[in-house]
Image (cartoon, rainbow, N blue to C red):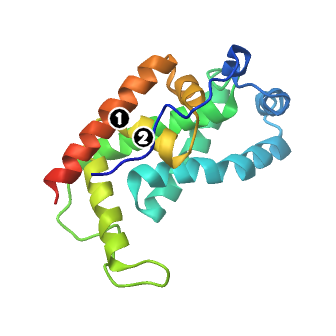
């Protein structure tokens, strides 16, 4: 069985923090609206690693994750041009867009499956600092994870890949905290079932 932790230990933040907007967000959003190159560069430098980690958690192929993460920033600029860009919380908007981009990626792959072996198939050789058992376990978890619904993958990636709190996850997913708890419990139960089946 795979257990990712308890939700009981998460402290409840004051309601005012649920807006998740910071003074930096305000400056970034203003600069973004003006398409200020320095602000855009700063946003990319600050948030690309966050978006990349989120995408890689769900895709498990570094090259594809980098392409998808880059596409998220292209989508941000396109959204700004069309007047539909982020209005309050930049990180939440970027992670939400990353979720859509990953879902689009999986849909395309599902529609056009390939018979070739890709670089995303893990190398089972022992590498420094990581045993064969650890690599096998990671592979089994990823195989189980991709069988979950996109929403279940999203909540697990945010809670355990990005280590967001329940409140932050609820904000990104546009749900209330109780709905996120229930979704997380169902996702973990489904993940455990998949892991048991893959033994």
Please tell me the numbered disc located at residue 38.
Answer: none
Q: Nearer the viewer, residue 62 or 182?
A: 182
Q: Is residue 70 visible?
A: no
**Residue 186 percent location from the top left of the image:** 30, 31
Q: Which residue is mark 2?
A: 156
Q: Residue at x 35, y 35 (%)?
A: 152
Q: Residue at x 66, y 28 (%)?
A: 81
Task: Say whether residue 140 is left or right of residue 67.
Answer: left
Task: Say whether residue 187 is left or right of residue 57.
Answer: left
Q: Is residue 28 visible?
A: yes
Q: Quadrant of the C terminus?
A: bottom left
Q: Which residue is mark 1?
A: 152
User: Could you tell me which secondary element the residue under label 1 belongs to?
Assistant: helix
Q: Nearer the viewer, residue 62 or 79?
A: 62
Task: Say whether residue 28 is left or right of residue 90.
Answer: right
Labels 1 and 2 touching (C-beta < 8 A): yes
**Residue 91 percent location from the top left of the image:** 65, 35
**Residue 53 percent location from the top left of the image:** 54, 53
Q: Residue at x 35, y 63 (%)?
A: 138
User: Could you tell me which secondary element the residue under label 2 belongs to?
Assistant: helix
Q: Residue at x 47, y 55 (%)?
A: 56
**Residue 51 percent location from the top left of the image:** 58, 47
Instruction: For label 1, count other residues whose C-alpha is less than 10 Å away and answer few (under 14), some (14-19) or many (20+).
Output: many
Q: To which quarter of the image does residue 83 belong?
A: top right
Q: Nearer the viewer, residue 6 or 160?
A: 6
Q: Nearer the viewer, residue 23 or 1?
A: 1
126 w.r.t. 194: above or below? below
Q: To which quarter of the image does residue 185 belong?
A: top left
> How many numbered tags mark residues here?
2
Instruction: For label 2, count other residues whose C-alpha is less than 10 Å away and answer few (under 14), some (14-19) or many (20+).
Output: many
Task: Say whether residue 45 is left or right of residue 7.
Answer: right
Q: CA distance from mark 1 to mark 2?
A: 6 Å
């Amino acid at each position: 069985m795979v257990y990712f932790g308890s939700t009981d230990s998460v402290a409840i933040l004051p309601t005012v923090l649920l807006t998740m907007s910071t003074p930096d967000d305000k400056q970034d959003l203003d600069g973004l609206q003006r398409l200020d190159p320095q602000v855009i560069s700063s946003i990319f430098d600050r948030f690309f690693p966050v978006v990349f980690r989120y995408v890689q958690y769900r895709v498990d192929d570094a090259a594809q994750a980098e392409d998808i993460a880059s596409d998220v920033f292209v989508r941000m600029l396109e959204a700004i041009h069309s007047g539909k860009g982020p209005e309050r919380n930049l990180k939440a908007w970027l992670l939400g867009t990353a979720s859509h981009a990953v879902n689009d990626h999986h849909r395309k792959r599902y529609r056009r499956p390939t018979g070739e072996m890709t670089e995303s198939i893990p190398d089972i050789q022992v590498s420094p600092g990581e045993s064969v058992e650890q690599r096998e376990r990671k592979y089994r978890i990823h195989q189980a994870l991709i069988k979950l619904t996109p929403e279940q993958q999203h909540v697990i990636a945010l809670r355990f890949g990005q280590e967001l709190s329940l409140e932050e996850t609820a904000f990104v997913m546009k749900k209330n905290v109780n709905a996120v708890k229930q979704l997380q419990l169902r996702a973990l139960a489904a993940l455990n079932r998949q892991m048991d089946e893959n033994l």
